[in-house]
Amino acid sequence: MVAPFDATEFRRTLGCLPTGVTVITTNMPGGEPAGMACNSFMSVSLDPPLIMLCVGHASSTLIELRQSGAFCVNILGSDQGRLCRQFSVKDIDRFAGVSWTESAAGPELCDALAWMSCSIETEQVAGDHVIIVAAVTALRVNRDEPAPLVFHRGRFGSFREATAEPLAR
């Protein structure tokens, strides 16, 4: 079936939905860090704790994630847009100049909003991406509680509480 719209229009429409921004990191077999920016991320289940992310088939990080079987989700704060862009660029050392600490699942980027260690449970091919469902094995939240980084219509921003009255009970 041919869609009555093109990929650009589809992407523009999806851009109307704000998303949180993460950097997914893992440890390569030789111990070197690997990572990628990811805004196709969401919670799946509270019991057991499961998350889901989508990774493009062409992503070099997909190979590294599969080899490791584990990864760290770094939820970015509002002042980390530049960091996200760095992890979006191909064929560079994405960790150059980045402060991070080691963890068994993958590097924890300093000053992130929160971190989750995960192990891959299952994969499902979906078009030009792979859906990865993973179990959350550990987590930690930044006590400074910075505002989250949000991606909307191709730009970075942050969350602002609505001034509307709360919903009626």
Image (tube, helix red, strand yellow):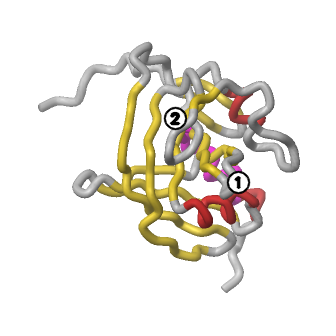
Residue 56 occupies which quadrant of the picture?
bottom right
Residue drawn at x 68%, y 44% is 33
- In this rendered view, identify the residue nearer to me: 81 or 36: 36
Q: Which residue is mark 2?
A: 75
Kindly identify which numbered label has been placed on residue 38. none
**Residue 57 sits above or below residue 113 on the image:** below
Q: Which residues are magenta?
A: 10-21
Q: Which residue is mark 1?
A: 30
Residue lying furthest front in this view?
A: 30
- In this rendered view, identify the residue nearer to me: 45 or 14: 45
Q: Amino acid at mark 2?
A: Ile
- In this rendered view, identify the residue nearer to me: 147 or 33: 33
Q: Amino acid at mark 1?
A: Gly
How far, Cα to Cα, is label 2 from label 1? 25 Å
Q: Residues within 10 Å of mark 1 (few under 14, many from 20)?
A: few
Residue lying furthest top in this view?
A: 144
Q: Position of residue 25 (x, y in %)?
A: 61, 45
SS assignment at label 2 = strand
Image quadrant occupied by the N terminus: bottom right
Q: Position of residue 30 (x, y in %)?
A: 70, 54
Residue drawn at x 57%, y 40% is 22
- Asked if the magenta segment contains residue 20, the reply would be yes
Residue lying furthest right in this view?
A: 91
SS assignment at label 1 = loop
Residue drawn at x 70%, y 50% is 12
**Residue 4 sits above or below residue 134 on the image:** below
Q: Is residue 37 left or right of residue 165?
A: right
Q: Earlier in the sequence, mark 2 or mark 1?
A: 1
Q: Position of residue 16 (x, y in %)?
A: 60, 44
